[in-house]
Image: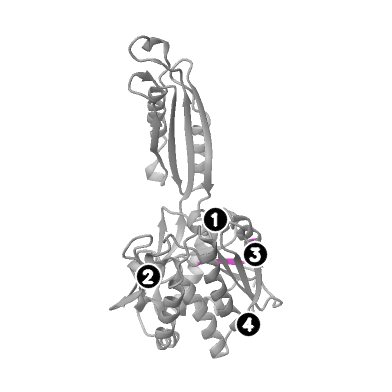
Amino acid sequence: MSVQTQHALITFYEARLANIVGLITDLANYETPTANKAAVDALGGFVRQKLEALGAQITHFPRESVGDIWLAKWNAAAAGKPILFLMHLDTVWGLGTLAERPIHIEGDRLIGPGTWDMKGSIGVVLSVLEGLQERGEFPNRPIWALFTTDEETGSLHSWEIIEEIARQVGLCLVMEFAATNGGIKTWRKGIANYQISVTGKASHAGNAPEKGINAVVELAHQTLRITELNRLELGTSVSVTVVQGGTAFNVIPDRATAQVDVRFKTQAEADRIHSALTTLTPVLEGAKIEVTQRSQRPPMERDAKMISSYEQLKALTAELGIDLPEEGSGGGSDGNITSALGIPTLDGLGPMGEGAHALHEQVVISSIAARAAMLDALLRGWRFDAE
């Protein structure tokens, strides 16, 4: 995202930059591995205090095995559709990581685990809401912020809540980090995982190989068939990734399994792959195939609704002197969930940086003010179709 001119709103957030970086640092200094409920809840309590200080009406969704979920609302009784910020408190980093790699600044980079994914985004959102209140320009429209706690492991404990809340809003702002080109993400691939289980017949590999049905050989045939389902030119990849089979070197294997990772840009492609995988037929006589879909996240498609939303945001940021490009991602986010419901969704609104889930995770400090200004302008200037 290149800044062409210095707009007053960007200057406003540049003047607050030290405070924003300090808040992000405070957030990142809470270690929040998804599986550690107590650790995630500690950050949830800290964020709740910040939300209460900003005058939010808060709803608490207790969870048993992951951190509790929080929904904050401002101007709940105001007319118009709510705008929803969608964020997650959990990270991929285990307890003790900060002792090895503490949060620190090097030049224009805030470096450390969780800074980019997504403590930086949470800090920017809280700072924008505070900035709007400080200027007396908080828009008279419903603004909501949802903080989930298991996005990094597939949102299984928050999926229903995300859907329930998203159905009530007019726009979802998914605060994942910025695209590599500095823009936002207008498409994300859907993700599905399948297990292929083959049953054959065991037999002695030396004395009676002809009496066996080799499950590994059958799985090899199926692997070649599955590989032919790729349509890379359409953004569809079908990859056999983990294969297991056999018990001993001298036994014809009667069991073999394979994990299949599927990525797709459209639901039509997801349906094509699902149909093909669930109708696989054996090549070897007597072999049996069982296909199980273990998980699926729908695609965030670059459809007419997405294009319209992107163009409106691009126009708003142009008024700030910002050229906002677009990009896509092969990985999913909670934006896949909301967009699949038909809710207008914008994703990748967080600051620039690099190293998500990597040892060099970091936020580009100089990108923060422009991203904050973009969100500020969006909240004040967004227009729904009926408005």
Residue at the location (63% across, 82% down)? 55
- State the CA–CA distance, disc 4 to disc 2: 29 Å
On the question of residue 301 being in view, the answer is no
Front of the two marks 4 and 2 = 4
**Mark sitting earlier along the chain (3/1):** 3
Front of the two marks 3 and 1 = 3
Q: Which residue is mark 1?
A: 155
Q: Which residue is mark 4?
A: 55
| Residue 61 numbered tag | 3
Count the numbered circles shown: 4
Q: Is residue 172 magenta?
A: yes
Question: Which amino acid is tagged 4?
Answer: Gly
Q: Are marks 3 and 2 in contact (CB under 8 Å)?
A: no
- State the CA–CA distance, disc 3 to disc 4: 19 Å
**Mark sitting earlier along the chain (4/2):** 4
Q: Is residue 103 magenta?
A: no
Q: Which residue is mark 2?
A: 352
Residue at the location (41% across, 72% down)? 351
Element carrying mark 1: loop
Q: How many C-alpha atoms fall within 10 Å of the one at disc 1: few (<14), some, or many (≥20)? A: some
- State the CA–CA distance, disc 3 to disc 1: 14 Å
- Does 182 sit above or below residue 342? below
Range drawn in magenta: 167-174
- State the CA–CA distance, disc 3 to disc 2: 31 Å
